[in-house]
Image (cartoon, helix red, strand yellow):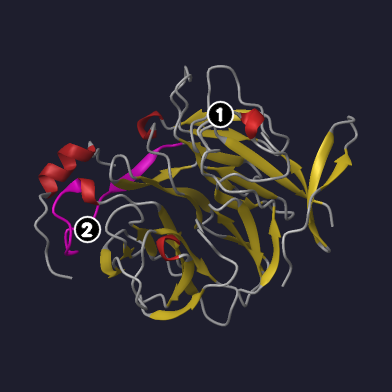
Amino acid sequence: MNKKNLSRRNFLKRTGFAAAALTAAPYVIAQDKSGSRLPVIGSGEHQYEVIHDWGELPAGHAYGNTHGVAVDAQGLIHIKHTVGKDAKIDDAVVVFDADGKFVRSWGKQYKGGAHGLHLSQEGGEEFFYLCDPKRHLFAKTTLDGKEIWRKWAPEQCVGYTKPEEFNPTNVALAPNGDFFVADGYGKSFIHQFDRDAKYLRSFGGKGSEPGQVSCPHGLMVDERGAAPMLVVADRGNNRLQNFSLAGQHIGFVKENVMEPCHFHTHGKLMVVPDLHARVTLLDENFKLVVQLGEGPGYAGIRTLTRDHFVPGQFVAPHSAYFDHVGNIFVVEWVEVGRVTKLRKLA
C-alpha cells in the first residue's frame, strides 16, 4: 500500500516507544473431593467441570477485565488483564502454575491496555506477541516481560492519519514466521509482517463484503487442514472469515457463532470464546461439536459483582486456551475479571 501521512517521530513520542452438531447441554452439579459442589457442562466426550475464579491471586493484585490467556511449554498459565481499580500492584500479566499457585507478575507498562496475548515458540524459545489498544501498539516480549520491540500502524498502509486510529487487538503467527496484527478496535485492517517484523501488506478494512471485516477482534493461523489459513473472528459481522496467508478471501463460517472473540486449537478441536456468553468447540471442518456454559448475555451483567454470576454459565468470554491435556482456560470481559478452568472429565 502507498505511504500514509503519519509522522513516525510523532508516533514514537505519543506511544512512548523505547528501542529494544450438539447444542448447549444444561449443567449438572458434581461433587469434588473437598465436598465442594461444582457445575459440569457439555455432553458426550466433551464434559468439563467448571472451576470459576481459578488461581490464587495474591494480596495487592486485583483483576480488571481479563482479556488474554496462554499456557506455555512448562504448563504455566499466563493471564493478561487491565488491572483493577483497587489494585496496589499495577502488573498487567499474572502467572500461575498448573495448581493455581501464583508464580510471578509483570507488565506495569501495559496497565489498562491489556488485550491479545499470543504465545509463540521460535527456535526453542517462547515469546509473547501482545497488543495494547490503549497505547496503540503491539509488542514482542519474553515470557517474563522483557520487551524485544514494540510497533505501531505501518506507515505504508493508507487510511491512518493519527496514532489513535490504530487499536490492535490480537496477533497470529504463521509457520514461516510471518505474523498478522488485527486492528480490531481501529480501522479493521489486518497487517502482515515477516519474521523480522518487516511490513509486507495490509488487507481487510471495514465492511461486510468478502474480504472485508468489521472488528477483526481475534485471529489465528489454522493448521488443521491440508494447508494453513488465517481464521479471523469477524466479530462485528457475527461470523468467522477465512483467508489465505497472502490475504485472499477463502470463505465464511456463519453458523454457531454470534460474537466470536478469538481461537485456540488442540488436536482437531478449535475453541471459540464467544462474547455472547458461551464457549464453542468446532471440529476441523468448522462444524459444531458442543457449546458450553451459555448464559443470558453480558448486557447489564458484566459490570456487576461476582455474586450476580450464575455458576456454570459464562458472562462474556473474551479469550480461551487449551492446556496440554485438553483442559480449557477461559477469561472474561467483566469488570471484576474472571478466570475459569474447564477441567476435562471425559
Which numbered disc covers residue 324?
none
- The residue drawn where x is 62% and y is 78% is 285
Q: Could you tell me the amino acid type at mark 1?
A: Arg
Residue 162 magenta? yes
Q: Could you tell me the amino acid type at mark 2?
A: Pro
Which numbered disc covers residue 104?
1
CB atoms at circles 2 and 1 under 8 Å apart? no
- The residue drawn where x is 42% and y is 39% is 114
Real-space Cα separation, disc 2 to disc 1, in angstroms: 33 Å
Q: Is residue 79 above or below residue 5?
A: above
Q: Earlier in the sequence, mark 2 or mark 1?
A: 1
Q: In which quarter of the image is the C terminus?
A: bottom right
Q: Quadrant of the N terminus?
A: bottom left
x and y percentages locating residue 50 in the rendered image: 75, 43
Q: How many labels does the image show?
A: 2
x and y percentages locating residue 86 in the rendered image: 48, 19
- The residue drawn where x is 59% and y is 47% is 72
Q: How crowded is mark 2: few (under 14 residues within 10 Å), some or many (20 or more)?
A: many
| Residue designated by label 2 | 154
Residue stretch rendered in magenta on the structure: 145-163
Residue 313 magenta? no
